[in-house]
């Protein structure tokens, strides 16, 4: 259940971040509302995932890495932004770091 809450938090964060771009500096009402509601939902869900036993380093690492990767993909697909191979490599390094955190936590029993 904790990972499901974390996954929904990540999706809310991605929607809010994409909407932040679409809000054009909070000059457009609907995307601005989506930003505020999305980030409130993100942090509420993240806090519930932590309350249900996820370690903060693992939860935040997964949240951040997945958010970075998904926002980069969304920017490329929906906002006309470019994604270079160097950026893809950087995303891969972030994901590898999170994987190391998760594996390290499992080896110590902290997950």
Image (spheres, rainbow, N blue to C red):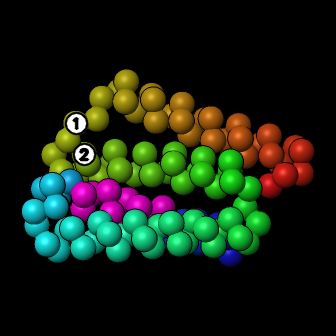
Q: Quadrant of the N terminus?
A: bottom right
The residue stretch that appears in magenta: 10-20
Tell me if residue 69 comes above or below residue 7 in the rendering.
Answer: above
Give the SS element for disc 2: helix
Indicate whether 88 appears above or below 35: above
Residue in the foreground of this view, choosing between 43 and 96: 43
Q: CA distance from mark 1 to mark 2?
A: 6 Å
The residue at the point 68 percent across, 65 percent down is: 50
Rendered location of residue 53, percent (x, y): 76, 66
Q: What residue does disc 2 label?
A: 76
Q: How far from the left and from the top, in percent, is residue 47?
A: 61, 68
- Look at the image and tell me whether residue 4 can be seen: no
Q: Main secondary structure of the magenta part?
A: helix
Residue labelled with disc 1: 82
Residue at the image position 17 percent from the left and 74 percent from the top: 30
Classify residue 28 as left or right of residue 21.
left
Q: Residue 68 in magenta?
A: no
Marks 1 and 2: CB-CB under 8 Å?
A: yes
Q: Position of residue 13 (x, y in %)?
A: 41, 61
Which residue shows up at 33% across the image and 63% down it? 16
């Amino acid at each position: 259940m904790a990972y499901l809450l974390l996954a929904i938090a990540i999706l809310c964060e991605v929607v809010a971040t994409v909407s932040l771009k679409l809000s054009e500096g909070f000059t457009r009402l609907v995307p601005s509302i989506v930003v505020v509601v999305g980030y409130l939902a993100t942090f509420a869900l993240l806090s519930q995932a932590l309350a249900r036993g996820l370690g903060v380093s693992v939860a935040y690492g997964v949240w951040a890495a997945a958010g970075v990767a998904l926002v980069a993909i969304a920017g490329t697909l929906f906002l006309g932004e470019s994604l270079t191979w160097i950026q893809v490599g950087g995303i891969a390094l972030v994901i590898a770091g999170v994987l190391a955190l998760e594996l390290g936590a499992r080896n110590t029993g902290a997950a």
